[in-house]
Amino acid sequence: MKSALPCSAAALCVLAGVASAEPVRFEYWYGLTGDLGAVVLETCNRFNASQDEYEAVCVGQDGYDKAVQNTIAAFRAGQHPTLLQAFDAGTADLMLSGEFYPVKQLMEDAGIAVDWDDYFPGIANYYSASNGDFFSMPWNSSTPVYYWNREHFEKAGITEAPITWEGLEAAFVKLKESGQACALAYAPSSWIDLEQFSMVHNAPVASNDNGYAGLDTELLFNTTLHVKHMENIQRWLNDGYALMRTQAAGKTARDSFVEGECSVFFSSIADHNTFHKLTPTFAWDVQIIPTYEGVERTNSVVGGASLWVLSGKTDEEYKGAATYLAFLATKEEQQFLLENTGYIPVTKSTYDALLAEGFYYNEPFIHRDIAMKSLTWTEPNELTRGLRLGGMIQIRAEWLAEVEAAFAGQKTLQEALDTAVARGNDVLARFAQTYAGKSFP
Amino acid sequence: MRRAHFKFSWIVPALLLPQLLVIFVFFYWPSVQALYWAFTLEQPWGGGNTWVGFENFRNIMSDPYYWGSVRVSTIYALATTALAMGMALVLAVFVDRQLVGSRVWRVATIWPYAVAAPAVGLAFQFVFNPGAGIFSYINAVAPGWWDLSKYPWQAVTAIVIAGAWKQVAYSFIFFLAALQSIPRSLIEAAAMDGARPMRRMLDLQLPLLTPTFFFLLVINITDSFTDSFGIVDTLTGGGPFRATELMVYRIYADGFRGFDYSGAAAQSIILMVLVMALTFIQFRYIERRVHYS
């Protein structure tokens, strides 16, 4: 704390000087924006107020992708932050560059004890090296769910939100019969329709255990259940059960759902809090993403972002970063994040404590823990621990452009997915060539 | 009379140095670096690169979608240039005629140039929004007819209109300045000979405008190739299914968003060569028809 009062006595001045010794400052660049960005900033303020040894200087970078882009540019100029909030799709390059300080190592070196086994396996596996050591710190974590309009469902005589696609399709039919013009507000999302879909169906997205086992990976999603699923979505769009709701089409799927235009919409659990703020006029609830009948359901994986510690900083700054990361992992701070956003707890002990307190029995948190159910459905296996694909952002873009072309009737879905896979494989091959001789940690 | 005689002075290079330094740091150095990256596979976080010769270029040239991107970029450049210069000329001619309120119109027409491209994109996002924008009135009459997410030609039209709107102001300033620099006596003489405004414009003013016209053509085409990214990003995001993926937008998507620095560098080199070639063609074939007074 800096005092604005002038010093009157020499002794007092000396004391004040000691008390206000400059804290060690370290920079933290984050990608979250809007309300969520304000929450990040608030955690920094809380951290800075909680102790006076370190000062986190937190700078919003206006989006996940910009946070990584700006950090790369800064890194090349030697002006990068100590901490970076990075989204999964943007970190393959960072992992292979080795220009980071694995958090497990960091915490050990800083002498901070962390119970790594306390993290949910679905989260831990996603953010750790093949030997199980965490390389980045899980923080804002989510997983997809679907939101459903309770009143529309009741009017159509459906009492429970189905957890199979067959059940959901039957619900679409009933909704339509009950006079509901649009059952599903659909926006193509590779994260939900391809990546998480493949996780819960135990289907591979790519060879090499989804890229974990090597860089010579090839995409496989044009050969799995994913094709049938996309064909079903196309059928629902054509038959009028679903409507395309994207920004370019004039209205987002979320707006469509909030306005009561469509009865179902898929999104991250992180939207749960946003929804309460939008105060829809109808009763609504969330449900885990469905699976097809005859398939043994597996766990979904975590989305969101994690915190990376970058190389090339001083020991002091690293100590500060470690203290901040430990601060974020406390039950109190996890709860702060949960209460102000729609994210989920990352450690079992925090989750158990929240359950014991009856946290999820109170609005606005009721049923938000459905995300935990999806995430912990089974122990993660080789196919469901996540994806390690270079050029993930380009692969997602290829998938989206091809799927859009198929929905517009330019080609069949099989052709579209074949093209997306072929082009995605080119991206993967380039990535492997760029990092020849290296492998994911 | 004494001849002016300058001794070599260190002041001259000293005064030039800052400008040269700026050009070096912000143009030559990045260009050389892009050229180098285009022949390698560069790791975004540093840590080395591999020399791959012309492979990046071969990959790009053999990609059918890349040629689609070149095609739509060319259409965009020609259409925005024609539209922007056409509108700018009409507006300049009216303002030059000193009609009522022409001072106000002059300021109002220059303004859009000060608006950043993403802001233009956002404004037009509202105009073209199929659900809530001005174009949604069309959908009220013919439901589903206007949908940027479905029809490539509509998406291309939208970015052309937004791009042209942004360019109008720049061309307008130059056209107006050129019109006002035409000696009044010429116009008055023509008027006394009985030439009506339309005739005076076609036979007198337009021929005298050709140097300005040529200058604006070169600038506008270059600008539409290189400065269109903000509009695409906010208005269509390159979609639907790559229909509005202009070359410069692709460079952004691959390089910055996708961390493929080398692929993006190679595309930048191709874009630079293309713009240089187009400028050369314009100087070679169109400038011949320009009358410098």
Image (cartoon, coloured by chain):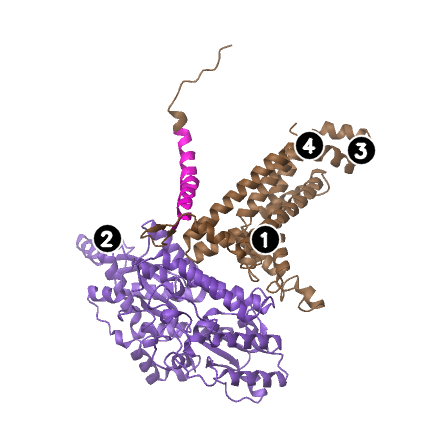
Q: Are discs 3 and 2 both within one chain?
A: no
Residue A185 place in picture, x, y as percent: 56, 74
Q: Is residue B224 magenta?
A: no
Q: How far apart are marks 1 and 3 (CA)?
A: 43 Å
> Badge 4 is on which residue?
B208
Q: Pointer 1: residues within 10 angstroms few (<14), some, or many (20+)?
A: some
Q: Which mark is residue B195?
A: 3
Q: Pointer 2: residues within 10 angstroms few (<14), some, or many (20+)?
A: few
Choose mark 4 or mark 2, whichever is in front: 4
> Badge 1 is on which residue?
B72
- Looking at marks 1 and 3 on the same chain, the residue that comes earlier in the sequence is marked by 1
Chain of the residue that carries numbered disc 3 in the rendered image:
B
Among the chains pictured, the one given brown colouring is B
Q: What residue type is labelled 1?
A: Val
Q: Give the range drawn in magenta.
A: B14-40
Chain of the residue that carries numbered disc 4 in the rendered image:
B
Quadrant including the C terminus of chain A: bottom left
In the picture, measured across the screen, residue B39 lies left or right of residue B227, that is left
Callout 2: SS? loop
Callout 4: SS? helix
Q: Which mark is residue A7?
A: 2
Please name the color used to draw chain A: purple
Q: Distance between the residues labelled 3 and 2?
A: 86 Å
Quadrant including the N terminus of chain A: bottom left
Residue A255 place in picture, x, y as percent: 55, 71
